[in-house]
Amino acid sequence: MTREHLIKPLLSAHYPKIDYGKGVFLYDEHGKAYLDASSGAVTAGIGHGVQEVIDAMLAQAQKVSFVYRSQFTSEPAERLAKRLSDLAPGHDYWSFFVNSGSEATETAMKIAIQYWQEQGRLGKNKVISRRMSYHGITLGALSMSGHVTRRRRFIPLLEELPIVAAPYCYRCPYQLSAASCGQSCADDLETNIKRIGADHIAAFIAEPIIGAAGGAVVPPAGYYERIKAICEQYDILFIADEVMTGIARTGTMFGMEHWGVEPDLIALGKGLSAGYTPIAATLVKDRVMEPILAGSQIVMSGHTFSANPQSAATALAVLDYIAARQLVDAAEEKGRYLRQKLERIAANRAIIGDVRGKGLLLGLEFVADRASKRIFPVSLGVTTRLVERAQSKGLLVYPAAGGVDGEGDAVIVAPPLVITTEEIDLLASLLEESIAEVMGEVM
Ligand code: PLP
């Protein structure tokens, strides 16, 4: 056996070595092209090799790449915080910078608990999340996540936090229809708050559109409006985990804009730097900062690389690029075009049970039988087959967990927002070929 040193996701698997990227394509060391229809892990929002961002990174590196947050602030970090406050729903947010989405959601959890502590309400320390959810891989973030396969190995180490129903209309937990359900899944939050007692609950956390744990699952109309009203009624903070949906991905700058809801805290990651450097952020509404400012004055979180000027300058350059190219609108328009293509594929291929999502965060759920929505046996590994078949043809799609507890099959299709209609046509034809071949094997 050849001695290796890099721990890869699946140790026995072979991973192509990427040489460079340009636009929506990645090229491996043998010159094979991959159309990046997953933006990596829904991250490379502006595509690869953008010169304006590279120039900004170089300019910042020539000034200073690192300062320690406990000793200094920096112009890029301050400017980025102001920019995010101006962009976020309802404005008036402070930013705490971290390095990954997991750190951003975990910091949101800690600030929510601290908010109540500063007011002497020490019992309000639980965060409610949803059955189908993924908020990150560190132990605090994983405690708030319902993603079964990512939790399984660490269950003894996780906090037991309350879980409520997910707004998963394709397999409605109440067997109701989205048009007339009255948002029973949102009411489940209220039922659980009453059961546990609002005095024990600091916050509720939700992804605007469920990503890895569902495959771009969009809630029924009125869901988030009802959730926000429940949170306000019972004195519970609302954390929007916008790590996947934030920064133009769904056709609005923040996913929550689709429902006109202003979260108390927002977690951002992935698209914030579009993958050019690691940076993530926890946005905190003014009113949540108030008792901390009047109290201890210290947000007890932080990492060595927090508020790194190099990453902040990169994120600013990404936001400039998004504004200059009007990529929020592009996500909406291109998303509509891609969705039509996916619906056309679904019309021809009975393995596709559902096409969903918003903007350029779209999902396909696969079923063994469309009428009964029967899932495939796990042993068939339909999602993995499809992702691998697509990759062999030079197309990257993102594997997600389908079904209530991840026992089903789904993929996310989320190309960079700069994708052209010709590239979407190519994406759709490679995807349909891959789906047709996998369908031939498993149905
Ligand atoms: N929250 C959501 C909604 C995510 O999709 C992810 C990652 O997929 C995370 C949090 C965790 O982010 P990271 O992998 O950067 O730690």
Image: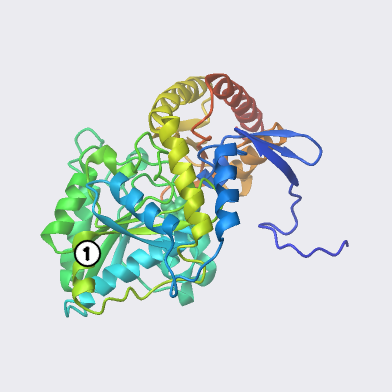
Residue 143, quarter of the rendered image: bottom left
Q: What element carries label 1?
A: helix
Q: In this view, does 130 lie to the left or right of 216?
A: left
Q: Which residue lies furthest to the left in this view?
A: 233
Please state which of residues 85 and 242 is positioned toward the viewer in this rendering.
Answer: 85
Q: Give the colour scheme of this rendering.
A: rainbow
- Placement of 237 over or under 187, stated as above or below: below
Please state which of residues 286 and 182 is positioned toward the viewer in this rendering.
Answer: 286
Q: Is residue 246 left or right of residue 178?
A: right
Q: Which residue is drawn at 42% across and 39% down?
A: 249
Q: Is residue 417 left or right of residue 223?
A: right
- Placement of 209 over or under 269, stated as above or below: above
Q: Residue at x 19, y 35 (%)?
A: 180
- Residue 413 percent coordinates (x, y): 51, 36
- Residue 11 percent coordinates (x, y): 72, 59
Q: Which residue lies furthest to the front in this view?
A: 63
Please state which of residues 302 and 442 is positioned toward the viewer in this rendering.
Answer: 302
Residue 201 visible in image: yes
Would you name the residue on which mark 1 appears?
288
- Residue 304 percent coordinates (x, y): 51, 71
Residue 172 visible in image: no
Count of marks placed on residues: 1
Q: Residue at x 33, y 46 (%)?
A: 208
Residue 438, quarter of the rendered image: top right
Kind of residue indicated by mark 1: Val
Confirm if mark 1 falls within 8 A of ligand 1.
Answer: no
Identify the image quadrant of the C terminus: top right
Identify the image quadrant of the N terminus: bottom right
Assess disc 1: are there few (<14), some (14-19) or many (≥20) residues with their C-alpha within 10 Å of its C-alpha.
some
Residue 163, quarter of the rendered image: bottom left
Q: In this view, does 165 lie to the left or right of 370?
A: left
